[in-house]
Image (tube, rainbow, N blue to C red):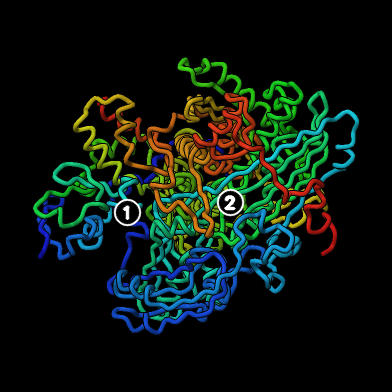
């Protein structure tokens, strides 16, 4: 069988869903309905912490149009990642404002909402713990007094009280490094707030109960998680749940977890009708699985020459009332904060902390965005302490070929250093945009390390007798274009047909095998690997049939431009349709299957404890450069120019990647400058819509200058890497470093809103102090790294 | 009392309460789901429609105010399935991602470019201020609009 060469799959294929999306024809989940469908609404707690004393639904049930009411008794199960700590409804205890108490289905939404009003609720308030500092205080009230009784789904993480999960990464002798006579210790602290995804399509689901099974149409990134977690909440076999996914109107990680689907499913079963549930914007704001707020302390021991002898860090991640994604994301610190630089010895702990606030979740380059901010600002503080140019410091210290990461994995090839050189060339090509209007000018170049989550994916390719191919996977199109561009390109290139002739089936857990979901930059990589394998099987079968038809050896055939021919000039051959039709008649319809899984790059034994992934299969690097002007009168920061050099392995579709970079950078600018979430004294999220949560607008942004760096090693098919996740990674870092350079102030927090910048300029921003991060690194751990529980 | 309006050139009648947001009448009664109720408070622009030729947030427009008026939705801008120049340019610039904001973007830009056939880049940016997008970072949308204007 001849090998598909990488260049075959590289195309500027335009996405096929654009026309329908531009003409209003695309039917997202919120646009779907069925005759006789009921409308659902969820009753949510108004207090942050309390004991549920009374929940009486009898009056509500008697109201007109009400068809079903579901409560905790209908959903006995607990689910989670790492620890099963989360039930669908508050059971005896309320843990955050917005926690579901009951769900109603009625003929109209107004009737469902009226029924919510009629449910009698009594909650006896308990002390609320709203900050990580309070949660870690001695004798703090326990948010989960029964934490020891929860089922543990992954062994290894330390847990106790309000510490939901603790992961450590230790390599080398950090104490010895810090004790070296030639080093100086630089210490930095940082704090970031939450970020709301503001996906335009709210979380939405339409559910039916048919033939003893649930069918849920939903706006999700993770159809298989929805299938399995719905079953877990409801206490039914997972095989009874089918999940299909229409086009998703934005996600960014928000939809990387189970959301409202089980309510709709439960109500469909109870009522015997289709049930539609769509979050209001206010519900989306209140119960967003935000990018978590975090608090970070980093210390490094550096030599006068700029060698990083040792480094330690404590990262506190607020998981809110339930562990959710944060449990998993504690793993990431080792790679996002432990990446970027060659370090002699390091010890890192990341701790997910329970608070009585809405649970946090995953958001594009989750954990990495703030750890990169912290690491890059810390790096600039080191360079300043040494009196070294920050770019020179980076040039000397970025990870290179053979360097070890925080868990002892060996990085391959020089990638960051040549990328820095590319950025320097870009910088040199354009004069600095120094303003002449009295505003302060600052500039910074930062580096970042991300990685592609690989993990299981499955694909089937059915070759049709008309030479079209149908690709069946559980992949979801969330807007990134993977399903519209990357995957059809891979299949088409392998089969010698046009990408237009690859039909991509919408995700359906009844039709395709398990998939981890869209996120972490894995879609085109993992589903791409599975799709490539499936297409190669089809290719082999067609070539075998064609070889018989042509009385030739399969190895002598070429398959391209819709034909299979004997290689060479004037080669005889057939159209692929003719071969596919013959194959179908001879052996039945032609199909191929593919599966991919994590490759498992080794780490050093014992380095990582409580981690879900010990080493990175596919590291991804990014270098960003940002120029800002700061108004000393108002504290307003304007981004003047933005440049990105991104490691993409191999660019399958440069246009699609460019769109991801522009969009990701702009989302990062919002995070860096004005997207702010705050929580009031009662534990309620203050921002309830677009008016109070400011996302970037057209007048805020600049065109991002993009250079794709190709050729770094990757285990991905054709050497590709995920490209949609990483563009947001260094944006907070770059803006923060540029603002620090402009103002001379110590930037320790994001977002850099005008009031915060003004306070920095006026010296009125107090230095961060974290009494709940203890001076000695070891004292922050529940148990010593590597000790048995 | 029923509300009579012309929607995309067709006479339509709604039995909705006059205070019902127009976006709900369009979507739930007339099955024109192009306009998206994203924020329901007039900030995001995803439900923008034309009311007697002027762009309006359909979430803040009571259905009663549509009485006797001509309503234009994104579905009406591509008669016969042909993309209008704005839509075609957005395709050409590979601008679309999740797509939820585009029905409103297309209505806004089509109207804007009819009024301002030779806009500057800053005028396009200003015209888009009422239409938020969470995916694209706007630049390709701006470029697509300028391309239409240059044609």
- Image quadrant in which you'd find residue A380: top right
Read off the residue under disc 2.
Answer: A292
Q: Position of residue A557 (x, y in %)?
A: 52, 43
Up/down of A202 relative to A312, above or below: below
Mark 2 and mark 1: Cα distance apart in space: 26 Å
Number of on-image labels: 2
Dot 2, how many residues are within 10 Å of its Cα: few (below 14), some (14-19), or many (20+)? many
The one of A685 and A730 positioned closer to us in this rendering: A685
Please report the residue visible at 29 percent of the width from the left and 52 percent of the height from the top: A25
- Which SS class for mark 1? loop
Q: Position of residue A452 (x, y in %)?
A: 61, 46
* Residue A497 visible in the picture: no
* Residue A317 visible in the picture: yes
In the visual, does A715 lie left or right of B42?
right
Read off the residue under disc 1.
Answer: B40
**Host chain of mark 2:** A
In the visual, does A679 lie left or right of A326?
left
- Which SS class for mark 2? loop
Q: Position of residue A434 (x, y in %)?
A: 51, 17
Q: Position of residue A233 (x, y in %)?
A: 55, 73
**Host chain of mark 1:** B
The one of A616 and B41 positioned closer to us in this rendering: B41
In the visual, does A440 lie left or right of B21?
right
The one of A654 and A727 positioned closer to us in this rendering: A727
Please report the residue visible at 81 percent of the width from the left and 23 percent of the height from the top: A305
Dot 1, how many residues are within 10 Å of its Cα: few (below 14), some (14-19), or many (20+)? many
* Image quarter in which the C terminus of chain A is found: bottom right
């Amino acid at each position: 069988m001849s090998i598909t060469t990488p260049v075959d799959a590289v195309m500027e294929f335009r996405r096929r869903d654009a026309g329908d999306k531009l003409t209003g024809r695309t039917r997202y989940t919120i646009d779907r309905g069925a005759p006789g469908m009921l409308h659902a609404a969820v009753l949510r707690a108004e207090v942050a912490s309390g004991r549920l004393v009374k929940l009486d639904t009898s009056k509500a049930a008697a109201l007109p149009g009400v068809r079903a009411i579901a409560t905790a008794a209908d959903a006995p199960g607990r689910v989670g990642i790492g620890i099963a700590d989360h039930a669908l409804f508050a059971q005896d205890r309320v843990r955050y404002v917005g926690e579901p108490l009951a769900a109603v289905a009625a003929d109209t939404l107004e009737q469902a909402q009226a029924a919510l009003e009629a449910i009698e609720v009594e909650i006896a308030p308990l002390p609320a713990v709203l900050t990580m500092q309070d949660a870690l205080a001695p004798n703090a009230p326990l948010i989960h007094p029964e934490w020891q009784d929860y089922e543990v789904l992954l062994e290894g993480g330390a847990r106790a009280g309000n510490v939901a999960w603790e992961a450590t990464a230790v390599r080398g002798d950090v104490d010895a490094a810090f004790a070296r006579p030639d080093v100086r210790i630089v210490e930095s602290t940082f704090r970031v707030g939450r970020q709301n995804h503001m996906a335009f399509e709210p979380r939405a689901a339409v559910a039916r109960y048919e033939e003893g099974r649930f069918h849920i149409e939903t706006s999700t990134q993770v159809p298989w998680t929805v299938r399995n977690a719905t079953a877990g909440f409801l206490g039914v076999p997972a095989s009874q749940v089918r999940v299909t996914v229409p086009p998703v109107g934005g996600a960014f990680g928000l939809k990387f977890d189970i959301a409202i689907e089980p309510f709709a499913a439960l109500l469909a079963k109870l009522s015997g009708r289709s049930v539609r549930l769509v979050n209001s914007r206010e519900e989306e704001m209140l119960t967003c699985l935000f990018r978590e707020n975090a608090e970070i302390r980093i210390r490094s021991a550096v030599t006068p020459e700029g060698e990083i002898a040792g480094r330690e860090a404590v990262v506190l991640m607020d998981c809110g009332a339930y562990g959710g994604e944060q449990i998993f994301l504690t793993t990431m610190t080792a790679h996002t904060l432990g990446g970027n630089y060659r370090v002699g010895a390091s010890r890192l702990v990341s701790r997910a902390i329970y608070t009585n606030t809405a649970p946090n979740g995953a958001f594009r380059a989750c954990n990495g965005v703030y750890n990169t901010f912290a690491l890059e600002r810390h790096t600039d503080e080191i360079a300043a302490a040494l009196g070294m140019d920050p770019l020179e410091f980076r040039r000397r210290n970025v990870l290179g070929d053979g360097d070890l990461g925080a868990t002892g994995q060996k990085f391959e090839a020089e990638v960051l250093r040549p990328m820095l050189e590319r950025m320097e060339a870009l910088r040199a090509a354009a004069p600095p945009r120094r303003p002449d209007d009295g505003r302060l000018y600052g500039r910074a170049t930062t580096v970042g390390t991300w990685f592609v989550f690989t993990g299981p994916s499955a694909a089937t390719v059915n070759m049709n007798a008309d030479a079209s191919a149908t690709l069946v996977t559980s992949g979801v199109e969330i807007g990134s274009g993977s399903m519209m561009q990357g995957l059809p390109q891979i299949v088409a290139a392998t089969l010698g047909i046009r990408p237009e002739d690859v039909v991509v089936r919408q995700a359906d857990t009844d039709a395709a095998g398990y998939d981890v979901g869209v996120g972490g930059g894995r879609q085109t990589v993992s589903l791409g690997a599975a799709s490539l394998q499936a297409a190669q099987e089809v290719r082999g079968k067609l070539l075998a049939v064609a070889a018989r038809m042509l009385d030739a050896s399969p190895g002598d055939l070429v398959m391209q431009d819709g034909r299979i021919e004997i290689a060479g000039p004037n080669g005889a051959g057939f159209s692929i349709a003719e071969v596919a039709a013959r194959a179908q008649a001879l052996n039945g319809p032609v199909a191929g299957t593919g599966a991919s899984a994590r490759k498992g790059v080794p780490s050093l034994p014992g380095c990582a404890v409580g981690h879900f992934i010990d080493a990175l299969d596919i590291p991804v690097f990014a270098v960003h450069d940002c120029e800002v002007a700061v108004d000393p009168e108002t504290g307003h920061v304007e981004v003047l120019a933005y440049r990105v050099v991104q490691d993409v392995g191999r660019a399958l579709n440069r246009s699609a990647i460019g769109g991801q970079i522009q969009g990701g950078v702009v989302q990062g600018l919002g995070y860096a400058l004005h997207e702010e979430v705050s929580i009031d004294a009662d534990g309620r999220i203050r921002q309830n819509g677009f008016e109070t949560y400011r996302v970037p607008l057209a007048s805020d942004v600049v065109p991002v200058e993009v250079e794709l760096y190709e050729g770094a090693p990757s285990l991905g098919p054709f050497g590709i890497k995920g490209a949609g996740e990483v563009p947001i990674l260094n944006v907070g870092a770059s803006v923060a470093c540029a603002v620090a350079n402009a103002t001379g102030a110590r930037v320790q927090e994001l977002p850099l809103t005008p009031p915060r910048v003004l306070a920095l300029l006026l010296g009125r921003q107090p230095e961060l102090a974290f009494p709940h991060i203890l001076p000695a690194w070891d004292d922050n751990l529940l148990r010593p790294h590597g000790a048995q529980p | 009392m029923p509300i009579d309006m012309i929607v995309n050139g067709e006479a339509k009648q709604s039995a909705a309460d006059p205070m019902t947001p127009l976006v709900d009448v369009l979507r739930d009664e007339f099955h024109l789901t192009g306009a998206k109720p994203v924020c329901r408070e007039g900030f995001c622009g995803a439900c923008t429609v034309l009311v007697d030729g002027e762009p309006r947030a359909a979430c803040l427009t009571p259905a009663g105010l549509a009485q006797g008026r001509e309503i234009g939705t994104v579905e009406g801008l591509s008669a016969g399935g042909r993309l209008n120049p704005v839509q075609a340019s957005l395709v050409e610039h590979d601008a679309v991602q999740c797509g939820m904001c585009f029905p409103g973007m297309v209505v806004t830009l089509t109207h804007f470019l009819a009024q301002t056939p030779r806009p500057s880049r800053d005028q396009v940016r200003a015209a888009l201020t009422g239409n938020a997008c969470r995916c694209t970072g706007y630049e390709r949308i701006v470029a697509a609009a300028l391309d239409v204007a240059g044609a």
